Amino acid sequence: MIRTEELRTLPIEYDDVIWNSFARDHSVTAKSIEEKAKILKTMIRDGQATLNQKRMEWTNIGVTGIFQNYSVYENNRLELNELLYHLGLIPEVASIDGRLLTTEQTEELTSCCQQGKRYLRYTPNRLGKVDISHINDECCSQYVDLALKDKVAIWKETHLRKEFLNRVWKMEQAKTLTSEAFQSSTSVRLETGSLSLLKTPVTYKAVDVYQRFGSDTLIHCSYVNSETLDECAARGYLNKSELDSLRKLVDVQERYILMTRQTEEEKHRQLDFKSKKLSWISQSKSFGNGSAI
């Protein structure tokens, strides 16, 4: 099996033999580690729930665990988009659903859209399939009786290793995408499966849609992130009672977030940046007439 340190030294050019070995060994290692991290997270979540703690910080380890409630809504989408447009908020809280644009509109936006990124997907066949059914029993026998902080420490080590393997996979994808094998074909067969060339969807900016086609198309093609809407309402950029009149609460669910200190700090930076942008919009002279776009 390829050792972790060896995964960084694969050749740039595509090679059947090496990719057979790399794809299979990486798949085995990555899936095993991912399953181990998942099981440990469940153990930690259950342990924290038993202590009745919404938030716990293991400062010495650099990990935080949080139980977080979130609301699930059904929106009156078009009326909500119209409200957001007139408040000048739609560029910050909405994305464009390209499926709602006409063929002519997508063609006109070709010069300014964000093209999808090419990536490889490895699909194992019978020889390449990974059996991880034993991981659960192994984790239970090894970790179930450990102290909560020890489980957290092992989860962090496992999580960081998983992230490293994901970076390695992306690096090797980037190298292989430039090889001749994928210049003339979208799929390559391996002994253990196949590599398929795929592409993420094209993305469009609200400002570009507005400038070319006007407010009606923008309102028709936008979709909204509900959590960002709640954030706008909480910060006073959006009237909550007006917002609630345009959506129906369907459910309140709970999720458990386990993250490293570095990840939490990055989330705070992103929220701070988003808050400053929304604050700028709310204070701009054009706020309230849609022209902040």
Image (cartoon, rainbow, N blue to C red):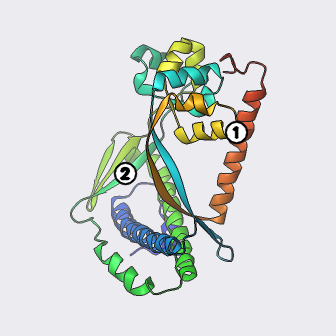
Q: Which is more foreground, mark 2 or mark 1?
A: 1
Query: The N terminus appears in which quarter of the rendering?
Result: bottom left
* Residue 232 quadrant: top right
Residue 99 seen in the current view = yes
Residue drawn at the location 41% of the way across and 54% of the way down: 14
Residue 100, labelled with which disc? none
| Camera-nearest residue between 244 and 61 | 244
**Residue beneath disc 2:** 121
Q: How far apart are marks 2 and 1 (CA)?
A: 41 Å
| Helix, strand or loop under label 1 | loop
Quick check: 169 above or below 286? Answer: below
Residue 9 seen in the current view = no
Of the residues under marks 2 and 1, which one precedes in the sequence? 2
The kind of residue on which mark 2 rests is Arg
Residue drawn at the location 40% of the way across and 80% of the way down: 139
Residue at the left extreme, as displayed: 126
Quick check: 3 above or below 80? Answer: below
Residue 209, position in %: x, y? 55, 19
Residue 86, position in %: x, y? 63, 19
Residue 223, position in %: x, y? 49, 30
**Residue beneath disc 1:** 235
